[in-house]
Image (spheres, rainbow, N blue to C red):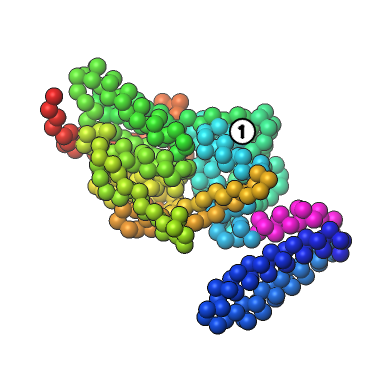
C-alpha cells in the first residue's frame, strides 16, 4: 500500500475513533462503552481491509482521492434514495436549480436501489420537448448504464448532446431520446383566464421566486376578469401535474396564499432544526372562491405539501391521479472546499398528521390522464377537448357555489 493511501487510512481511522469515542462517552452512561469500542475497531479494520484490497487487486489503478470520495458517496447514498454527497460542481448545480437557472436537459429524477426513475420533465426543456415522461426508467446515458452520477451526466456544457435510453411501461422495447443540453431558465408559472371567470395557474416547480410569481399571476387574472366582466374570479384551477417539487418554504408560501389559518405542514426529525410546524397567516387571496388542484404521478415533494394542505383544510378539491409519494425533507449542508451533503433530516406530515411517503396523496376525484399525457409546458395551449383532468375540473367548478366573503367598501 502506498504511503498516501496509508495516510488516508490513518485519517479515516482517526475520524472513526474520534466519532466512536464521542459516541462511547454518551453510551458510557448505560455501561456499554466496551462493546461500542470493540465494534468501532472491527468497523475500522474492515474499511482498511477493503481499501487495501481495492488498491492492490482492482483491475486498473484507482486514484486515492477518487476511492475516498466514492466511499463517502456510498456511505451517504445508501442511507436512502434522496440523500447524497455533493462535490463542488454538484452543489453549485443545486444552488443554481433552486434559483431557476442551470444547464442540462431538464429532468427531475429519483433513485431507488437499482433504478433511476423520472419524477417529471420540467416544462420547456429539451427532455420535455422530446417526450420524456414521468415514470420513465433511465437505463443508459450515452450508451453507459445509469448509475449514482446520473445528475452529473445529464448536466453539462450548453450545446452538447446526450442520449437517453429509457424503459416505459406499456412498451416492449426501450425508447431512445437524443437531447441537446441548454441553458435553462425555468419559469415557475403560467396563467390564463378560462370561461371569462375561472383562473388557471400552472406551477412547474417550486423555486425561490415561485410564491411571488404566483401572487402576481393571480392579481393579473383578477384585474383581467374585473376589466372584462366586472366580476371577481369565480374559481381557480391550480395545476401541479408533473411538478417535481423544490424548496419547502416556496410550498408553504403557495399554500398560505389560499388559507386563512391552521397548520400547513409539520415535520419530525432528530434535531431541533428538523422539527417544525408552518402555519397559515390570515388572508385568502381568492377571498374564498372555489379551488381545484390537478395532480398526477409526477406531482412530488413540495407539490404534495400544497395538495395535502389544501385537501386537509377543505380548501380545494384534488383532481387527477395519486401523487408520487415523496414525504421526506432534505437539508443541504455545506462542507469544506465547496462541497456539501444533501441529507434527509425530516419526515413531513400533512395538517391531518398523515405521512405520505411512499404512499402519495389520493385525489378526491380520480381521473386518469390521457395516454401520453397532455402537453403541459408553460408555453403550450391548453387542450380543452382531450385533457380529461382539466375538463373534470371545469365541470366541478361549474357546479360549486361562489363563496366570496362579503366585503364592505
**Residue at x 46%, y 43% (from the top left corner):** 247
Q: Is residue 263 left or right of residue 138?
A: left
Front in this rendered view, residue 278 or 70? 278
**On the rendered structure, is 15 left or right of 25?**
right
Residue at x 28%, y 20% (from the top left corner): 224
Q: Which residue is mark 1?
A: 103
Q: Quadrant of the N terminus?
A: bottom right
Q: Is residue 218 above or below residue 94?
A: above
Look at 55% across and 54% down and name the residue there: 343
Residue 341 coordinates in the image, percent (x, y):
60, 51
Please give the count of numbered marks on the rendered protein. 1
Left or right: residue 13 versus residue 150 is: right
Q: Position of residue 373 (x, y in %)?
A: 44, 38
Q: Is residue 3 visible?
A: yes
Q: Is residue 275 left or right of residue 409?
A: right
Q: Main secondary structure of the magenta part?
A: helix
Q: Nearer the viewer, residue 276 or 384?
A: 276
Q: Does 357 lie within the magenta span?
A: no
Q: Residue furthest right?
A: 2
Q: Which residues are magenta?
A: 58-74
State the residue lying farthest toward the top: 227
Q: Determine if residue 358 is in view.
A: no
Amino acid at each position: 500500500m502506498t504511503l498516501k493511501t496509508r495516510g488516508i487510512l490513518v485519517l479515516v481511522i482517526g475520524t472513526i475513533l474520534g466519532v466512536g469515542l464521542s459516541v462511547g462517552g454518551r453510551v458510557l452512561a448505560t455501561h456499554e462503552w466496551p462493546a461500542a469500542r470493540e465494534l468501532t475497531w472491527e468497523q475500522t479494520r474492515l474499511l482498511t481491509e477493503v481499501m487495501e484490497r481495492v488498491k492492490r487487486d482492482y483491475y486498473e489503478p484507482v486514484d486515492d482521492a477518487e476511492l475516498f470520495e466514492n466511499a463517502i458517496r456510498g456511505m451517504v447514498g445508501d442511507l436512502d434514495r434522496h440523500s447524497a454527497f455533493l462535490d463542488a460542481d454538484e452543489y453549485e448545480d443545486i444552488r443554481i436549480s433552486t434559483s431557476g437557472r442551470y444547464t442540462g436537459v431538464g429532468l427531475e429524477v429519483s433513485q431507488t436501489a437499482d433504478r433511476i426513475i423520472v419524477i417529471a420533465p420540467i416544462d420547456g426543456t429539451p427532455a420535455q420537448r422530446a417526450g420524456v415522461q414521468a415514470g420513465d426508467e433511465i437505463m443508459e446515458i450515452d450508451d453507459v448504464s445509469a448509475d449514482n452520477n446520473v445528475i452529473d451526466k445529464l448536466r453539462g456544457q450548453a450545446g452538447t448532446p446526450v442520449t437517453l435510453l429509457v424503459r416505459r411501461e406499456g412498451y416492449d422495447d426501450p425508447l431512445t431520446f437524443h437531447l441537446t443540453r441548454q441553458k435553462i431558465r425555468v419559469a415557475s408559472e403560467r396563467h390564463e383566464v378560462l370561461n371569462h371567470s375561472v383562473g388557471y395557474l400552472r406551477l412547474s416547480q417550486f423555486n425561490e421566486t415561485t410564491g411571488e410569481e404566483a401572487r402576481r399571476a393571480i392579481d393579473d387574472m383578477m384585474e383581467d376578469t374585473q376589466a372584462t366582466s366586472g366580476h371577481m374570479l369565480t374559481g381557480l384551477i391550480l395545476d401541479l401535474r408533473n411538478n417535481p417539487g423544490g424548496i419547502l418554504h416556496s410550498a408553504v408560501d403557495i399554500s398560505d396564499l389560499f388559507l386563512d389559518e391552521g397548520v400547513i405542514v409539520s415535520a419530525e426529525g432528530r434535531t431541533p432544526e428538523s422539527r417544525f410546524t408552518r402555519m397559515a397567516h390570515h388572508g385568502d387571496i381568492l377571498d374564498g372562491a372555489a379551488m381545484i388542484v390537478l395532480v398526477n404521478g409526477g406531482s412530488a415533494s413540495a407539490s404534495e405539501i400544497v395538495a395535502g394542505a389544501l385537501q386537509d383544510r377543505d380548501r380545494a378539491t384534488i383532481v387527477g391521479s395519486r401523487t408520487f409519494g415523496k414525504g421526506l425533507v432534505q437539508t443541504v449542508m455545506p462542507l469544506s472546499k465547496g462541497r456539501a451533503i444533501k441529507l434527509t433530516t425530516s419526515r413531513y406530515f400533512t395538517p391531518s398528521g398523515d405521512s405520505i411517503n411512499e404512499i402519495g396523496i389520493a385525489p378526491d376525484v380520480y381521473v386518469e390522464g390521457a395516454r401520453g399525457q397532455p402537453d403541459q409546458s408553460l408555453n403550450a395551449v391548453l387542450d380543452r377537448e382531450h385533457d380529461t383532468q382539466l375538463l373534470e375540473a371545469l365541470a366541478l367548478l361549474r357546479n360549486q357555489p361562489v363563496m366570496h366573503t362579503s366585503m364592505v367598501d
